[in-house]
């Protein structure tokens, strides 16, 4: 009887014992609950997966009630302080932090793949002059599958590792090219002498100077932001990566789908939406009026609230500290005043307190990006670069998980019953 759930079906009076493992029952165990033998059996209904675990995972742990985020057991605060983004990427993909030799080898295996085929550059040049960089990023990542057809062999571990390195290496290059395209600037090739984020900043901002030295504080701040965004367990885009990956599509196609899921304003597009919101508010004096509009349901306070965190998002705390370091170099972003005032009012207002709405990762990240001269349209792309690592770690875990099958939810059909087609002349 221990570790079981007793369910009585009041339609039939029958009682069932369902095993409980890790505080969970298996949805398929509900299928034995039927009124008639020839019925399909009971299902659970869970739009938006509010209470459904889709996988067992050993990558990222979140305790949203107390605001904890850990990668492979390591608290996000310690990783942000003591590790680099590429060390964190290694950790997420391999399960352990690298030693010095492993890190050197890992960095080299990424650097080997930073360049994209010249033809990819020409392909990107075909986009409209004002194309949104995220649209370019998504499409170009998808196009990479045509360059690496061998990536279809997703069950081959050596091949899989190569595609993982390619994607992590090329994501910043494609991202920077998409920015240069919409600015009308020539594209910069990668410089492997620089760090992962230093190289990205150089590809973004180098103009005619012979040598571009990214500011070390800004490169470090971006590295921290990348660590914070690297993974976040079963969120919307990771779920998309896993769903596409479950059909054994190649990782470029799957990752393009994940990036598309990230693009929406309720997910990775939120940082862009925050900046738009702060700009529209425009003045600290207008904050109370805006809060009233939010409470009246006319709009949302973007950058607030989270499906899992019902406490301060731990990433937002680290970002707030990082913002001070960046502003010491770049000067204070004038929108910060409005953001701080919004946070102050919201954290003390009953509407937000009752619903446990706190600032999430996107509330302050946009202010840092803007201070670093990164345009608002690049914000979701800046989320997609580091999340590439999380998507790939989750994809690899899925492929090695013997319990996983092609993702295929059920539905409750609510349409008409069977009826006959009437020829068009009689309709
Ligand atoms: N502003 C105002 N009210 C809100 C907000 C908000 N940002 N978020 C949630 N609520 C209210 C919502 O109206 C509802 O109220 P009621 O119970 O009266 O109907 C209640 O809080 C619960 O909201 P929900 O929409 O059921 O919660 P959810 O878990 O489905 O949505 C969310 C989570 C992140 C989509 C939502 O909080 C939101 O839209 N936030 C703004 C967008 C944003 O910042 N997204 C970034 C998420 S963090 C980065 C990432 O992982 O992508």
Image: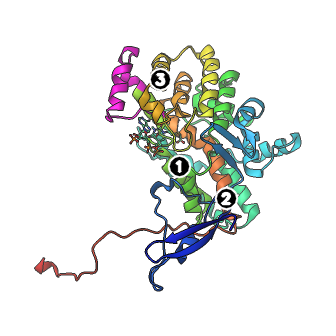
Residue segment shown in magenta:
278-304
Residue placed under numbered mark 3 in the picture: 348
Callout 2: helix, strand or loop? loop
Q: Is ligand 1 less than 8 Å from the beta carbon at label 1?
A: no
For mark 3, does the 10 Å Cα neighbourhood hold few (<14), some (14 to 19), or many (20 or more) residues? few
Callout 3: helix, strand or loop? helix
**Residue 125 appears in the picture as rendered:** no
Is 399 contained in the magenta span? no
Q: In the image, is residue 23 above or below residue 345?
A: below
Can you tell which mark lies on residue 235?
A: none
Residue placed under numbered mark 1 in the picture: 259
Of label 3 and label 1, which has the lower sequence position?
1
- Percent across and percent down for residue 32 are 54, 77
Of label 3 and label 2, which has the lower sequence position?
2
Q: Quadrant of residue 64?
A: top right
Residue at 55 percent across and 46 percent down: it is 121
- Percent across and percent down for residue 404 are 64, 67
Q: How far apart are labels 1 and 2 at the CA level?
A: 23 Å
Q: Residue furthest bottom?
A: 38
Contact (Cβ within 8 Å) of mark 1 with mark 2: no
Question: Quadrant for ligand 1?
Answer: top left
Q: Is residue 407 left or right of residue 420?
A: right
| Of 275 and 412, the residue lying toward us | 412
Residue placed under numbered mark 2 in the picture: 56
């Amino acid at each position: 009887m221990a570790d079981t759930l007793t369910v009585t079906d009041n339609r039939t009076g029958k009682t069932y014992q369902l095993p409980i493992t890790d505080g969970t029952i298996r949805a398929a165990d509900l299928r034995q609950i039927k009124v008639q033998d020839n019925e399909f059996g009971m299902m659970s209904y869970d739009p938006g997966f509010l209470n459904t675990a889709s996988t067992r995972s050993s990558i990222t742990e979140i305790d949203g009630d107390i605001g904890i985020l850990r990668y492979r057991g390591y608290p996000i605060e310690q990783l942000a302080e003591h590790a680099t983004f590429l060390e964190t990427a290694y950790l997420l993909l391999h399960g352990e932090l690298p030693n010095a030799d492993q890190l050197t080898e890992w960095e080299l295996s990424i650097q080997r793949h930073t360049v994209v085929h010249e033809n990819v550059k020409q392909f990107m040049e075909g986009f409209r002059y004002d194309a949104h960089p995220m649209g370019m990023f998504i499409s170009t990542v998808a196009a990479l599958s045509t360059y690496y057809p061998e990536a279809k062999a997703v069950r081959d571990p050596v091949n899989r590792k190569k595609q993982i390195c390619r994607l992590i290496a090329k994501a910043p290059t494609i991202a920077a090219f998409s920015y240069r395209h919409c600015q009308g600037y020539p594209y910069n090739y990668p410089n492997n002498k620089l760090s992962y984020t230093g190289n990205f900043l150089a590809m973004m901002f180098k103009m005619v100077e012979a040598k571009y030295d990214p500011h070390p504080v800004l490169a470090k701040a971006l590295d921290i932001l990348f660590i914070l965004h690297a993974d976040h367990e079963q969120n919307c885009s990771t779920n998309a990566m896993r769903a596409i990956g479950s059909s054994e599509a190649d990782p470029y196609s799957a990752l393009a789908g994940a990036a598309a899921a990230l693009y929406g304003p309720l997910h990775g597009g939120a940082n862009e939406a925050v900046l738009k919101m702060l700009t529209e508010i425009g003045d600290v004096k207008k904050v109370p009026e805006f809060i009233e509009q939010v409470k009246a349901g006319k709009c949302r306070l973007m950058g607030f609230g989270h499906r899992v965190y019902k406490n301060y998002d731990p990433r937002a705390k680290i970002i707030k500290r990082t913002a001070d370091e960046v502003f010491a170099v770049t000067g204070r972003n004038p929108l910060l005043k409005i953001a701080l005032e919004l946070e102050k009012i919201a954290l003390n207002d009953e509407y937000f307190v009752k619903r446990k709405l706190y600032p999430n990762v996107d509330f302050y990240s946009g202010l840092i990006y803007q201070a670093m001269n990164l345009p608002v349209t690049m914000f979701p792309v800046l989320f997609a670069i580091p999340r590439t690592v999380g998507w790939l770690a989750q994809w690899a875990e899925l492929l090695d998980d013997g319990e996983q099958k092609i993702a295929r939810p059920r539905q409750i059909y609510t349409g008409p019953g069977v009826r006959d087609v009437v020829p068009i002349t009689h309709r």
